[in-house]
């Protein structure tokens, strides 16, 4: 936040870069329009988009739109002929005599189509589109270059199709900005939206307490995680304007020293208008020859997409890797510019990896296979096409060495995350799969999806992904980071990082107990944030398992049920044959909306978002058709791991 300080005339002159016409002391705000009246007053309209008067406050309340002040606001199109209506609303002239123009804005994010324009001497000098949502939030224009000049405000709706309208309220002149200013000014609106939605939505009983999630907005694929200088850095697809997919997407950023306690940072990668970008979609990373991380992303140049995607990159702009800037060689991979076959124009999700002293990128969603490129310079700005590494293709490819083998992960909408394990020939750059599996038995876009891996200073391969689900402004969270290993049978194993055990609190244990078919065994432990490790002997029962988030009367619960060689985790069923004396081993994490179930040694995992009633907090073991023996059970309540929201602009 810009801080107010008392300045001498000389200091004020230096601060304002010689703008002598600006006052050295703050003046009261000057209201230009609050749209609380029955008419627009002296404002002039053209077309039909804005009608003849502001929309009343009751309308916004009835539509659950937030941020509006007073008795009315500008809201184009819907009430005045539908989204196809066009027009302008223009203010009387006024003199610029304060440093900032502050206003609330929302609506469609369409440059020069649904926007608020600042006109100086009759020309548009600044244009601010809506924030891709019906709620409004503050935006500020720095008026320093135009002090003392005559200006007008023009609210514009030129969108004749699609989701096109603009919402505006409370326009004021002020000596103080309503929003924070970031080194990349194009992030200002996104960060203002995050702050607005976070304040408006607050907390609710679904938001996790020890999983990472953004303070508001839509979280999607994990992008380019890495470990360096004592920090784990994780990036993720983030649309800050609403809890669903939107046109404008950047890379959210968080870091942690222990993979348990997280610090949310400002956006790392954000679309830049001067590069023609409207969104920065998913990707990966690699370290350059100097050991600095390079983030690879897909640059979307229009949406809905008519122009082929390109693959670009960002590099650190400071030693702490909080600020990032675009790679000077962008775009690194234009569409069909390296002699490749005709890939799908929406090819995307570049993933970087190293083998020895060679650095490669693979790209997904080409619809003809997975191409591979090799870096030709130390800064990872020049790339050569090397053919196809693998004939299969999907979103979010991850390709990396694990032990003596290579692993290929891919995300595929209703199929979830699939993997193969095999060999990679460095001479031919061809990959040959040997085993196939899935990373999560809940094979759904809303489950584990959009994956990333990193290798830390302990030599561990850490697997990361997001799961979606949420309400009241948030949608999506980071699964518990998992250590990924390769079993002797050639299949992957996953277990949560041991650091998560630092959150264990109150403990309950059972040893050598039995559960009869007539009566479930209810634990003393209850709550919305738990860890449970159970070793069960199912041989005496036809069915058995756990009831989680159980109501006091036992009528409602989330079930983990084993019967007839099949495990059913909250409706997700898969074969799980057990040997004669083999126990059923379950490790369960509950964190409000998040449920993660690790089976046995981690060959099978189920991750789901659950939404039971807030009052259902119990845990019970049950058996059907005979008794079940409990070899051991340990249950812990889990302490929260509050997220530090460090969204201050870097100095």
Image (spheres, helix red, strand yellow):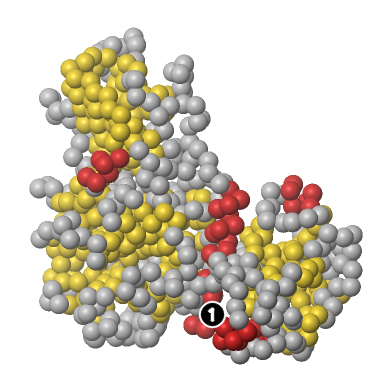
Q: Is residue 315 left or right of residue 178?
A: left
The residue lying at 38 percent from left, 57 percent from top is 263
Q: Position of residue 303 (x, y in %)?
A: 55, 71
Residue 109's image quarter?
Answer: bottom right
What percent of the width, then of the height, locates residue 541? 25, 17
Image vertical order of residue 218 relative to residue 628, above or below: below
Against 60, residue 428 (above or below) is: below
Residue 583, quarter of the rendered image: top left
Is 277 on the left-hand or right-hand side of 530? Answer: right
Q: Is residue 257 left or right of residue 590?
A: left
What residue is shown at x 40% (from left), y 79% (from top)?
A: 326
Task: Report the front residue among 348 and 23.
Answer: 23
Q: Position of residue 57 (x, y in %)?
A: 79, 52
Residue shown at 89% from the left, 73% from the top: 42
- The residue located at (54%, 72%) in the rendering is 181
Taking depth in this image into account, of 571 and 153 the one nearest to the observer is 153
Q: Position of residue 207 (x, y in %)?
A: 47, 43
| Res 227 → quadrant | bottom left
Q: Is residue 98 visible?
A: yes
Look at mark 1 in the image and give the residue it sits on. Answer: 273
Location of the N terminus (image quadrant)? bottom right
The vertical placement of 285 against 119, above or below, is: above
């Amino acid at each position: 936040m810009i801080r107010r300080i008392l300045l001498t005339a000389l200091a004020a002159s230096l601060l304002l870069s010689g703008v002598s016409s600006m006052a050295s002391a703050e003046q009261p705000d000057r209201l230009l329009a609050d749209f609380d009246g029955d008419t627009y007053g002296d404002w002039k309209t053209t077309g039909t988009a804005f009608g003849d008067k502001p929309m009343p406050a009751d309308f916004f309340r009835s539509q659950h739109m937030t941020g509006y002040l007073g008795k009315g606001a500008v809201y184009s199109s819907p009430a005045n002929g539908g989204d196809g209506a066009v027009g302008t609303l223009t203010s009387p002239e006024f003199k610029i005599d304060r440093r900032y123009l502050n206003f609330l804005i929302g609506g469609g994010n369409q440059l020069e189509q649904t926007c608020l324009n600042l006109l100086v001497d009759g020309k548009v000098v600044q244009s601010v589109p809506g924030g891709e949502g019906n709620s409004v939030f503050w935006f500020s224009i720095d008026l320093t270059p135009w002090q003392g000049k005559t200006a007008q405000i023009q609210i514009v709706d030129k969108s004749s199709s699609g989701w096109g309208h603009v919402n505006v309220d409370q326009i004021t002149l002020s000596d103080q900005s309503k929003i924070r200013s970031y080194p990349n000014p194009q992030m200002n609106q996104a960060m203002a939206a995050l702050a607005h939605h976070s304040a408006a939505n607050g907390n609710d009983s679904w938001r996790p307490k020890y999983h990472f999630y953004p303070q508001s907005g839509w979280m999607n694929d994990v992008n380019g995680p890495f470990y360096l200088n004592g920090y784990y850095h994780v990036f993720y697809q983030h649309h800050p304007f609403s809890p669903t997919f939107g046109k404008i997407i950047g890379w959210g950023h968080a870091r942690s020293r222990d993979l348990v306690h997280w610090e949310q940072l400002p956006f790392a990668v954000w679309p830049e208008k001067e590069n023609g970008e409207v969104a920065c979609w998913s990707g990966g990373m690699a370290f350059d020859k100097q050991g600095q991380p390079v983030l690879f992303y897909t640059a979307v140049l229009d949406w809905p997409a008519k122009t082929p995607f390109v693959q670009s990159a960002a590099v650190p702009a400071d030693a702490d890797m909080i600020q990032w800037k675009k790679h000077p060689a962008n775009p690194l991979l234009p569409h069909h510019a390296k002699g490749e076959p005709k890939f799908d124009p929406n090819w995307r999700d570049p993933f970087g990896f190293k083998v020895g002293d060679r650095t490669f990128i693979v790209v997904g969603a080409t619809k003809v296979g997975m191409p591979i490129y090799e870096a030709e310079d130390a800064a990872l700005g020049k790339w050569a096409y090397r053919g196809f590494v693998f004939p299969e293709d999907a979103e979010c490819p991850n390709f990396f060495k694990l032990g003596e083998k290579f692993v290929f992960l891919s995300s595929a909408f209703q199929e979830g995350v699939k993997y193969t394990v095999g060999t990679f020939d460095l001479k031919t750059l061809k990959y040959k799969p040997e085993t196939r599996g899935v990373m999560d038995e809940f094979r759904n876009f809303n489950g584990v999806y959009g994956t990333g891996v990193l290798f830390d200073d302990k030599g561990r391969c850490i697997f990361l992904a997001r799961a979606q689900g949420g309400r009241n402004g948030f949608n999506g969270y980071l699964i518990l980071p998992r250590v990924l290993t390769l079993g002797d049978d050639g299949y992957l194993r996953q277990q949560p990082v041991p650091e998560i055990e630092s959150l264990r609190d109150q403990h309950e244990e059972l040893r050598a107990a039995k559960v009869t078919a007539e009566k479930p065994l209810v634990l003393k432990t209850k709550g919305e944030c738990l860890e449970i490790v159970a070793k069960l002997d199912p041989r005496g029962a036809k069915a058995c398992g756990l009831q989680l988030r159980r109501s006091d009367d036992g009528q409602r619960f989330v079930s983990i049920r084993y019967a007839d060689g099949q495990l059913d985790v909250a409706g997700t069923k898969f074969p799980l044959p057990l040997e004669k004396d083999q126990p059923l081993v379950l490790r369960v994490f509950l964190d409000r909306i998040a449920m993660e179930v690790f089976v046995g040694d981690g060959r099978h995992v189920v991750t789901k978002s659950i939404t039971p009633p807030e009052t259902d907090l119990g845990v019970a073991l049950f058996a059907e058709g005979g008794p079940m023996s409990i070899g051991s059970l340990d249950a812990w309540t889990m302490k929260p791991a509050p997220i530090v929201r460090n969204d201050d602009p870097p100095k």
